[in-house]
Amino acid sequence: MTRGCEAGIEQQLQRRRRATAELCGLRDQVLLVGAGLPLPVPGRADRTYPFRAHSEYLYLTDRERPGGVLAFDPAEGWVDFVVPVTREEQLWEGASAGALGGAGIDQLDRWLEARRSRPVACLGAPVDGIRSEPALERSVRAALNQVRRRKDESELSRMRAAELATSAGFAHVARLLKPDATERELQIELEAEFLRQGADSLAYETILGSGPNTAVLHARPSERCVADGELVLIDAGAEVRGYASDVTRTYPASGRFTAEQAELYRIVLEANRVATERCVAGTEWREVHVAASRSIAAGLVAFGLLRGDPDALVESGAVYLFFPHGIGHMVGLGVRDAGEVLAGREPEPDAFPRLRVDLPLLPGYTMTVEPGVYLVPALLGDRDLRARHRDAVDWDRAERMLGLGGIRIEDNVLVTEQGFEVLTKNVPTFD
Ligand code: GLY
Ligand code: MN
Ligand code: MN
């Protein structure tokens, strides 16, 4: 499969390229964007990992084809160098022999030769034999990221399709939840329903844990049987034409939370609400993180796990014993889209947790909002952390609760001109 045939994609590609060219302000420099090549699986002869074009290349070409290079010379515009379909590809993969559009990759050398003395920024995957100027590369990537962050209609329609498949998968598995189901069975049902409902693939390896495994942030599903009274945490998403959903729900295995689980669930749900409502244009992402952290700290003080003033518990980092990750990240073209820490905002070296994204929100941005509360043995048993936060935690209670695991509720939120839209609102929560 090469080029998109959906309505509007050609105009969007032109718009994306025009906006990138304007923002990166090249004069005598040139830009190359590499698609990348299939990665061999080490030691497995001719096996390769499934090919994924580099996101920067895919965004500007909509081609999921290896070996291509998109080139840009500000004086002459864009040229799409593509690898023609081989007979081997027709034989083994059923590739169509039709024209791909663009110039043959064998013409790239001549194009480069004609621009030999000019500085090059190389984005996407490395291009053989090309030295990219580091400072130029950084500034062009920053410009492209700025364009990529505002999702256009084609991107949003793929994200909405991914969300439909994701909601169907979660709804299906929520109906199958019962004690004695294994994590693996639930994973299989979830993923099968994603694919039945239009997913091309998974946006990432499904994270699914039950009981104590729910405290493992990226738990891999196992043969473990879910037990009565336990939590089941599922973090998964469908992908459609390169665009991802990234959703987490936490369900009670037997259809009812215990009193303690219900209280913690409400704390996480409230933090999700507080953070989501701040996803409006102009808000700094770190403010969203701090608001969620403060909400969790206040909830855990009322619950009795933390002691003190919520702001002070955020300031000292005590709340991060129970919420040990950032509030979210940019999602869209892949599960980690073009979010970044803006230049000049390098995180403090000992800040815990580190934020992947530090920038102000604008209309068109799509963010995950994923607060959680977990009882993680590795954190709660850490001698230094215990000493540092000795008076801030009811350590006896935390120890008694260790087997409970964790709760996370993750949504994908689009910042709009008027406010925000929760793209994943149809994924069933437990209420
Ligand atoms: N789905 C993995 C994450 O949210 O980080
Ligand atoms: Mn997730
Ligand atoms: Mn996420």
Image (cartoon, helix red, strand yellow):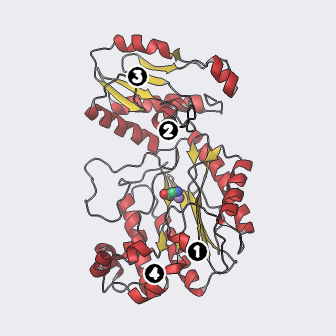
- Tell me which numbered mark, 2 or 1, is placed earlier along the sequence: 2
Position of residue 380 measured from the top left corner of the image (x, y, whole percent): 39, 77
Q: Identify residue for label 2.
A: 42
- Tell me which numbered mark, 3 or 1, is placed earlier along the sequence: 3
Along the horizontal axis of the image, is 364 left or right of 326? right
The N terminus, quarter of image: top right
Amino acid type for the residue under numbered disc 2: Pro
Position of residue 422 measured from the top left corner of the image (x, y, whole percent): 57, 59
Along the horizontal axis of the image, is 168 left or right of 45? right
Q: How far apart are marks 4 and 2 (CA)?
A: 48 Å
Q: Identify residue for label 1.
A: 211
- Tell me which numbered mark, 4 or 2, is placed earlier along the sequence: 2
Position of residue 81 measured from the top left corner of the image (x, y, whole percent): 49, 19
Along the horizontal axis of the image, is 78 left or right of 239? left
The residue at 45%/55% (across/down) is: 329
User: Please, what secondary structure does the residue beneath circle 2 have?
Assistant: loop
Position of residue 63 measured from the top left corner of the image (x, y, whole percent): 56, 30
Assess disc 4: are there few (<14), some (14-19) or many (≥20) residues with their C-alpha within 10 Å of its C-alpha: many
User: Please, what secondary structure does the residue beneath circle 3 have?
Assistant: strand
The residue at 47%/46% (across/down) is: 337
Q: Closer to the observer: label 2 or label 1?
A: 2
Q: Is mark 4 within 8 Å of ligand 3?
A: no
User: Please, what secondary structure does the residue beneath circle 4 have?
Assistant: helix
Q: How far apart are marks 3 and 1 (CA)?
A: 53 Å
Amino acid type for the residue under numbered disc 4: Gly
Name the disc covering residue 299, or none.
Answer: 4
User: Please, what secondary structure does the residue beneath circle 1 have?
Assistant: helix
Q: Closer to the observer: label 2 or label 3?
A: 2
Amino acid type for the residue under numbered disc 1: Gly
Nearer to the camera, 134 or 211: 211
